[in-house]
Image (tube, rainbow, N blue to C red):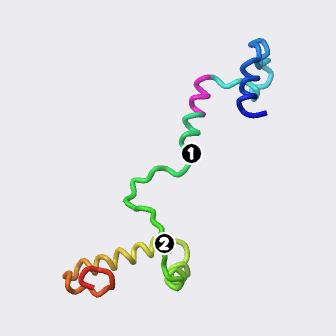
Amino acid sequence: MNHKQVLAQVRALPPQEDYQWDGADEDERPATAQELQAALATARKRGRPVSDSSKEQVSIRYDREVLAAFRQTGPGWQTRMNDALKEWLQTQQACSPGQRSAPGLPGG
């Protein structure tokens, strides 16, 4: 039985066959409209919160020995790698464009 068939059968049930709470067990009480709305609002908030970070996710390949060296430093190695790249960038920006020696960079 597929989803549409199940839905059609549920909708075909007469109202007198709807669940009727007997008041004996609070755990079996049907949720109110407000409780359902609160549950839906909570369910929509699942997942990682939206960050105001200026970071961008990319896919890049590094030499194995470079990754191994950073990974050996333990948890937070990706942050340290990012810091090392920012430090290198600052030293390159401090040089005049003609003094850059790294391959692939203008002046290199």
First-in-chain label (1 vs 2): 1
User: Hey, which quadrant is residue 83 in on the image?
Assistant: bottom left
- What amino acid type should be assigned to the residue bearing mark 2? Gln
Alpha carbon separation for disc pair 1 and 2: 25 Å
Residue 102 sits inside the magenta stretch: no
Residue 34 sits inside the magenta stretch: yes
Q: Residue 29 carries which label?
A: none
Which element type, helix, strand or loop, lies under badge 1?
loop
User: Hey, which quadrant is residue 102 in on the image?
Assistant: bottom left
Q: What stretch is highlighted in magenta?
A: 33-39
Q: Residue 78 carries which label?
A: 2
Total numbered badges shown on the rendered structure: 2
Number of residues whose C-alpha sits closer than 10 Å to that of mark 1, classed few (under 14), some (14–19) or many (20 or more) = few
Question: Residue 24: horizontal and vertical position, in percent?
Answer: 80, 21
Question: Residue 12: horizontal and vertical position, in percent?
Answer: 75, 18
Q: Is the residue 41 above or below the residue 100 in the image?
A: above
Q: Is the residue 63 above or below the residue 46 in the image?
A: below
> Do the numbered discs 1 and 2 sit on residues whose CB atoms are within 8 Å?
no
- What amino acid type should be assigned to the residue bearing mark 1? Arg
Q: In this view, does 1 lie to the left or right of 67?
A: right
Q: Is residue 11 left or right of residue 70?
A: right
Q: Which residue is drawn at 67% across and 25% down?
A: 31
Q: Residue 46 carries which label?
A: 1
